[in-house]
């Protein structure tokens, strides 16, 4: 259009000849005459279709094969190379590229893969769930985290929460937090097909769900609906939310002390997003539509116990391995089977139908997490392990116990003395034993017998209360001491003779 404008301006405004304009602009006089006749944008039109002497006779057969393949499962469809080989068997002598171009053009003309049907949901009908990966800075270190996204399908109410990974216990915890945030229970949840929730994909909407995930759905009476594979439009709201939340909350990079602080901030941001205008109902905010959503939901119920259970065997060193780390259990369970319940933030060990240990969960690798009290009974047989035992390094004990430990370990046999003191803590409690140690140090001694004496005095039972003398008869006259009464009783006894003989 720039050239057309120059030609028409020079000829029609400045009055120059067509020959001079063609010479100056390096155009033919035919082109100049065409531009002066028609001011529309220049375009090139294909007046006749391109000849295809090789593929032309085989187009009908190739079209039939392509349409037959479209009705078959994806894994049974023929590739472009296979179609090319089949055409060669029919006498085709053309190029492979021509077959591929024809197949691509036919698919573009017949497919509707780029067209979608808009979805509509009733209040309280469904919420959608998906994961995303974000980059944040926690405690001064840049790291990747997983963010669980939830969205009420009717009101567009948003909730997000961050985790170190996407394991099943994180899925369970995320759903429990989301339902607590919403304050109501929708009738169904629309999800993708991750292995943490879907273990097998059948025909159509047939799915085999993870047993633990299904237990949670059964607890809340929610129907899980898995999307068709590679059909993200079936939960398009949550797909759009992932990119929007990345822009709203994680750009620029979020910086917090730890994951708990990040989640607290995300919670407040989700509350604030409720003030935005609803994308469909322009006359109301998201929170106003959420009131209708919540009215159609079922009321909240008792929270689900969101753990994943695994049966493990404790090693001789009283450790069980889980998720690339090792955790200690009480010494008496060494070599025995332990039921481990993994929560999003902690691990609970069950044995003999009772909880025997609990640890905060570590998300590092090849770490050993000890509870020193689990190993104290072992010290009774191996007191020397107190000095270099891994569980007892950097043991956070009260100051009084640390002072006595330093004294005892300098003395011969002091290991056993301090172990005996630790065993007293299991018999009584840490506060009482600590008080006994503090009193002993105040007296200027730290010897074990002194500490045990003070401990026994602190824990001895109270003396019985005095009897109420009002309920008993009073003595009118005090009895006189008379030792002859004993001789008199002996004299009247049948064995008196034998007794006197023995005394003699």
Image: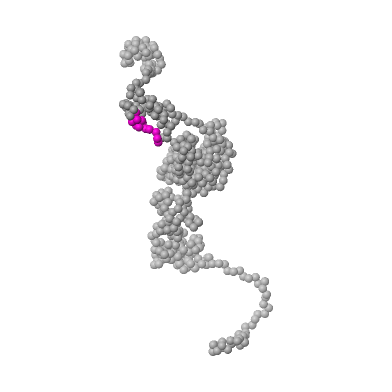
Residue that appears at 37% across and 18% down: 48
Question: Which quadrant does the C terminus fall into?
Answer: bottom right
86 falls in the magenta region: yes
Give x and y (percent) for residue 503. Answer: 54, 87
Q: Nearer the viewer, residue 197 or 373?
A: 197
317 falls in the magenta region: no
Left/right placement of residue 157 relative to residue 488 reads: left
Quadrant location of residue 64? top left
Look at the magenta stretch and give its main secondary structure: helix
Give x and y (percent) for residue 60. Answer: 38, 25
Question: Which quadrant does the N terminus fall into?
Answer: top left
The answer, for residue 442, to whether it is visible in the render is: no
474 shown above or below 335: below
Quadrant location of residue 478? bottom right
Give x and y (percent) for residue 132. Answer: 45, 40
410 shown above or below 154: below
Which residues are drawn in magenta?
75-87
């Amino acid at each position: 259009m720039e050239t057309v404008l120059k030609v028409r301006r020079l000829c029609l405004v400045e009055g120059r000849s067509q020959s001079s304009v063609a010479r100056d602009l390096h155009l033919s006089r035919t082109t100049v005459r065409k531009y002066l006749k028609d001011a529309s944008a220049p375009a090139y039109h294909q007046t006749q279709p391109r000849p295809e002497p090789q593929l032309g006779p085989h187009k009908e057969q190739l079209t039939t094969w392509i349409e037959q393949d479209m009705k078959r499962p994806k894994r049974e469809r023929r590739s472009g190379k296979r179609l090319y080989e089949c055409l060669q068997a029919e006498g085709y002598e053309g190029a492979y590229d021509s077959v591929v171009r024809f197949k691509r053009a036919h698919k573009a003309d017949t497919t509707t893969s780029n067209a979608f049907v808009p979805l509509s949901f009733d209040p309280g009908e469904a919420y959608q769930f998906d994961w995303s990966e974000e980059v944040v800075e926690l405690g001064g270190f840049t790291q990747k985290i997983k963010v669980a996204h939830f969205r009420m399908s009717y009101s567009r109410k948003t909730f997000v929460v961050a985790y170190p990974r996407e394991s099943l216990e994180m899925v369970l915890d995320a759903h429990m937090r989301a339902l607590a945030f919403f304050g109501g229970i929708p009738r169904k949840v629309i999800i993708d097909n991750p292995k943490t929730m879907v273990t097998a994909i059948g025909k159509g909407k047939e799915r085999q769900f993870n047993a633990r995930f299904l237990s949670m759905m059964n607890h809340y009476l929610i129907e899980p609906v898995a999307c068709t594979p590679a059909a993200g439009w079936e939960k398009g709201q949550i797909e759009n939310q992932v990119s929007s939340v990345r822009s709203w909350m994680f750009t620029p990079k979020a910086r917090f002390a730890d994951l708990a602080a990040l989640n607290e901030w995300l919670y407040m941001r989700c509350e604030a997003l409720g003030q935005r205008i609803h994308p469909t109902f322009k006359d109301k905010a998201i929170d106003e539509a959420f009131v209708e959503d919540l009215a159609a939901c079922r009321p909240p119920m008792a929270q689900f116990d969101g753990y994943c259970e695994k049966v493990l065997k404790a090693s001789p060193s009283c450790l069980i391995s889980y998720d690339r780390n090792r955790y200690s259990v009480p010494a008496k369970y060494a070599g025995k089977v332990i039921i481990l319940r993994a929560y999003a933030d902690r691990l609970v060990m069950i044995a003999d139908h009772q909880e025997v240990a609990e640890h905060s969960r570590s998300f590092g690798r090849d770490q050993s997490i000890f509870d020193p009290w689990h190993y104290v009974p072992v010290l009774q047989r191996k007191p020397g392990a107190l000095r270099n035992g891994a569980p007892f390094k950097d043991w956070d004990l009260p100051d009084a116990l640390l002072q006595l430990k330093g004294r005892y370990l300098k003395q011969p046999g002091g290991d056993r003395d301090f172990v005996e003191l630790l065993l007293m803590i299991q018999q009584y409690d840490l506060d009482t034993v600590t008080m006994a140690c503090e009193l002993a140090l105040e007296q200027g001694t730290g010897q074990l017998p002194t500490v045990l004496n003070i401990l026994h005095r602190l824990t001895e039972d109270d003396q019985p209360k005095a009897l109420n003398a009002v309920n008993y008869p009073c003595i009118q006259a005090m009895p006189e001491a008379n030792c002859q009464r004993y001789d008199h009783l002996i004299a009247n006894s049948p064995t008196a003779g034998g007794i006197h003989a023995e005394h003699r």
